[in-house]
Image (cartoon, helix red, strand yellow):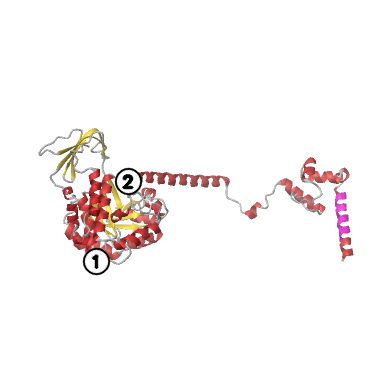
């Protein structure tokens, strides 16, 4: 890209972000719009008639109807792509031309779930679990956020997303402590130039004005007079009947955090009351029952999975629900969730998804292989059943020992009369050794052996009587 032809370089974006963070010491006396102008962000507002031509790049459109081009052009007018082709023909006013040779032009990523207000807390707990996340964000910094902090957090997140190739985010803003907080968060998204959905939500902890959710109507009238704009509005709420009714009254979509068996049970209640619909998006979706997945699909809802935050914070099963969504006939969205513990790179996010899918499929193959082996071997025997299955030579030895009234051979007993080596010299254990000790005449006449046993037993009984 030619620096002279570029409106804003990456270095300039970072400088502007730093300027926003340090521009106004008296944050309460200055509106977010004036902060943006002071930081030089006002020119980022899009002129609907402004035309830009990306020329000579390698285009991967991800759209079969458009196709791919080894070398092609993209014409952008205002906030929409007007034309894509090998050599776009121009008419009307001359556009601003950006040299895109030696670059790859692809559609921007969509981050379906981002808590943008946490942008100023990026990487603050790189090895944190969910308890540390809650302690740092909702219980730690969030109660002390000013409207200015909401503006800076959202702006840093939006500019970071653009730099990482993310051109659209759903901003799940669950720190709307006052109307001024909400206004600052929305204004930052407008000033950044990103396409965004501001999902306004209630704070999780601390004191706040309790102006939400009724404040959504005011926000809608002030900022969202049209549905055809870069930033739009929706509600961020749990499974709450009153909140959902208000959202539908205002014509707003709903995003909800959704995880585990308790949420699945509540979802079934909403299903029975016919409260589920295609206007609901479910984040995370770990640890859900098959019935819950079926309800989401049949109601027309959409799902978003979190390949990095679920393993990072051990949410649900600790494995993203990507494969579960596919198994139930749904195409999930991907999201970064937050930047408190890791970066905003979506390529890494997709790589984590691939790794988790391979891990899940390999574990499933091992499980199926183990079950197949057990079926081939037959049912397992209990320990009590195994006790009767002794080797034949041990059974013979036991019979001989009982007949002679002596203890069975134990190789660990040092006081026994015959060593293991002697037994092996005479052909091992069992009847062959017993026959060697009895002699040939006793082998020929088993009755003699039994008489000797009876004689020894009588002598032992007489000795016992003398002792007593």
Q: Which residues are magenta?
A: 447-461
Residue 301 visible in the shown view = no
Instruction: Give residue 31's quadrant in the image.
Output: bottom left
Instruction: Give residue 233's quadrant in the image.
Output: bottom left
Image position of 209 with respect to 224: above or below: below
Is 392 on the left-hand or right-hand side of 256? right
Farthest-out residue, left: 92
Residue 405, position in %: x, y?
Answer: 81, 54
| Total residue callouts | 2
Residue 197, position in %: x, y?
Answer: 24, 53
- How many residues crowd mark 1 within 10 Å: few (<14), some (14–19), many (20+)? few
Residue 118 tag number: none
Instruction: Give how far apart the Cα atoms at labels 2 and 1 are.
Output: 35 Å
Residue 345 tag number: 2
Is 346 on the left-hand or right-hand side of 415? left
Task: Pick the residue in front: 128 or 395.
Answer: 128
Residue 51 visible in the shown view = yes
Which part of the image, by quadrant, shows the N terminus?
Answer: top left
Question: Mark 2: which secondary structure?
Answer: loop
Residue drawn at the location 14% of the way across and 47% of the way down? 48
Residue 259, position in %: x, y?
Answer: 37, 57
Residue drawn at the location 14% of the way across and 44% of the way down? 50
User: Are circles 2 and 1 on residues that touch, CB within 8 Å?
Assistant: no
Residue 452 colored in magenta in the image: yes
Is 395 on the left-hand or right-hand side of 201? right
Residue 86 colored in magenta in the image: no
Task: Pick the residue in front: 203 or 447.
Answer: 203
Residue 65, position in %: x, y?
Answer: 24, 38
The earlier-in-sequence mark between 2 and 1 is: 1
Task: Pick the residue in front: 36 or 133.
Answer: 36
Residue at the spot of label 1: 211
Question: Mark 1: which secondary structure?
Answer: loop
């Amino acid at each position: 890209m030619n620096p002279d032809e570029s409106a804003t370089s990456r270095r300039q974006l970072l400088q502007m972000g730093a300027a926003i963070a340090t521009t106004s010491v008296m944050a309460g006396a200055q509106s977010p719009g004036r902060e943006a102008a002071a930081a030089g962000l006002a020119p980022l507002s899009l002129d609907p008639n402004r035309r830009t031509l990306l020329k000579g790049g390698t285009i991967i459109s991800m759209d079969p109807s458009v196709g791919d081009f080894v070398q092609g052009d993209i014409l952008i007018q205002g906030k929409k792509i007007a034309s894509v082709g090998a050599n776009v023909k121009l008419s009307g006013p001359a556009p601003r031309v950006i040299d895109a040779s030696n670059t790859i032009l692809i559609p921007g990523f969509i981050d379906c779930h981002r808590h943008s207000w946490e942008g100023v807390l990026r990487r603050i707990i790189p090895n944190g679990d969910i308890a540390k996340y809650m302690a740092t964000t909702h219980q730690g910094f969030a109660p002390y956020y000013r409207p200015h902090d909401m503006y800076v957090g959202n702006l840093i997140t939006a500019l970071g997303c653009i730099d990482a190739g993310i051109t659209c985010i759903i901003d799940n803003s669950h720190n709307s402590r006052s109307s001024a907080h909400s206004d600052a968060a929305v204004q930052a998204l407008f000033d950044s130039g990103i396409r965004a959905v501001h999902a306004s939500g209630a704070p999780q902890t601390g004191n706040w004005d309790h102006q939400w959710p009724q404040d959504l109507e005011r926000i809608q009238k002030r900022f969202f007079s049209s549905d055809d704009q870069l930033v739009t509005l929706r509600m961020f709420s749990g499974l709450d009947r009153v909140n959902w009714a208000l959202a539908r009254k205002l014509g707003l979509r709903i995003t909800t955090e959704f995880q585990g068996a308790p949420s699945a049970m509540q979802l079934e209640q909403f299903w029975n009351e016919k409260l589920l619909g295609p206007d609901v998006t479910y984040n995370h979706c770990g640890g859900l029952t098959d019935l819950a997945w079926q309800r989401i699909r049949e109601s027309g809802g959409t799902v978003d999975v979190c390949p990095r935050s679920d393993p990072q914070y051990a949410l649900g099963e600790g494995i993203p629900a990507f494969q579960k969504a596919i198994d139930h006939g749904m195409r999930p969205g991907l999201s970064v969730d937050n930047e408190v513990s890791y970066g905003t790179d979506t390529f890494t996010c997709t790589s984590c998804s691939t790794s988790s899918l391979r891990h899940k499929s390999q574990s499933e193959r091992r499980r199926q292989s183990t079950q197949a082996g057990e079926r081939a071997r037959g049912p397992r025997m209990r320990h009590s059943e195994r006790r009767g299955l002794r080797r034949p030579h041990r059974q013979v030895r036991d019979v001989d020992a009982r007949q002679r009234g002596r203890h069975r051979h134990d190789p660990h007993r040092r006081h026994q009369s015959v060593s293991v080596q002697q037994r092996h010299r005479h052909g091992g254990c069992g009847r062959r050794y017993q026959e060697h000790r009895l002699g040939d005449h006793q082998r020929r006449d088993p009755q003699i052996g039994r008489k000797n046993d009876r004689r020894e037993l009588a002598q032992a009984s007489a000795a016992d009587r003398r002792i007593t």
